[in-house]
């Protein structure tokens, strides 16, 4: 199962994935860096590429996802 998890410490990418409907499977802490884990690695990799190629998302969904993830990450500090 762990082989099928997508791992990112970039909150903007994680926000994009969450706003696109991907489900958070957890998080992991590595020193001062928190990574967000998503299921379906291959689909997430495609969406990550879409993000870097200028993919679009509704601004309010992206902002809501970003704020949710920021709160989740800060709980570890």
Image (cartoon, rainbow, N blue to C red):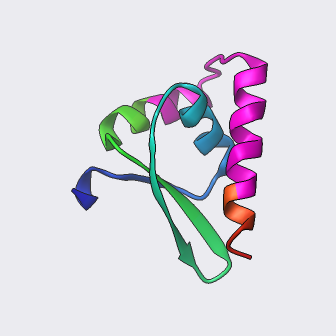
For the N terminus, give its image quadrant. Answer: bottom left
Q: Main secondary structure of the magenta part?
A: helix
For the C terminus, give its image quadrant. Answer: bottom right
Residue 61 falls within the magenta-colored stretch: yes
Residue in view at x 68 percent, y 62 percent: 73
For the residue pair 33 and 18, the one nearer the viewer reads as 18
| Rendering coords of residue 68 (x, y %) | 71, 45
Q: Residue 42 vs residue 57: left or right?
A: left
Residue in view at x 69 percent, y 42 percent: 12
| Rendering coords of residue 46 (x, y %) | 41, 30
Q: Residue 36 vs residue 40: left or right?
A: right
Q: Is residue 47 above or below residue 75?
A: above
- Residue 65 is drawn in which quadrant? top right
| Rendering coords of residue 66 (x, y %) | 73, 41
Residue in view at x 26 percent, y 50 percent: 4
For the residue pair 22 and 33, the one nearer the viewer reads as 22
Residue in view at x 75 percent, y 65 percent: 74
| Rendering coords of residue 34 (x, y %) | 61, 67
Magenta span: 47-71
- Residue 51 is drawn in which quadrant? top right
- Residue 75 is drawn in which quadrant? bottom right
């Amino acid at each position: 199962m762990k082989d099928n998890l997508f791992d990112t410490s970039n909150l903007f990418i994680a926000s994009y994935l969450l706003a696109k409907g991907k489900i958070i499977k957890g998080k992991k802490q590595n020193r001062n860096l928190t990574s967000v884990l998503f299921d379906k690695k291959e689909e997430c990799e495609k969406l990550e590429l879409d993000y870097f190629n200028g993919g679009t998302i509704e601004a309010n969904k992206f902002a809501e996802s970003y704020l949710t993830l920021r709160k989740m990450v800060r709980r570890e500090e």
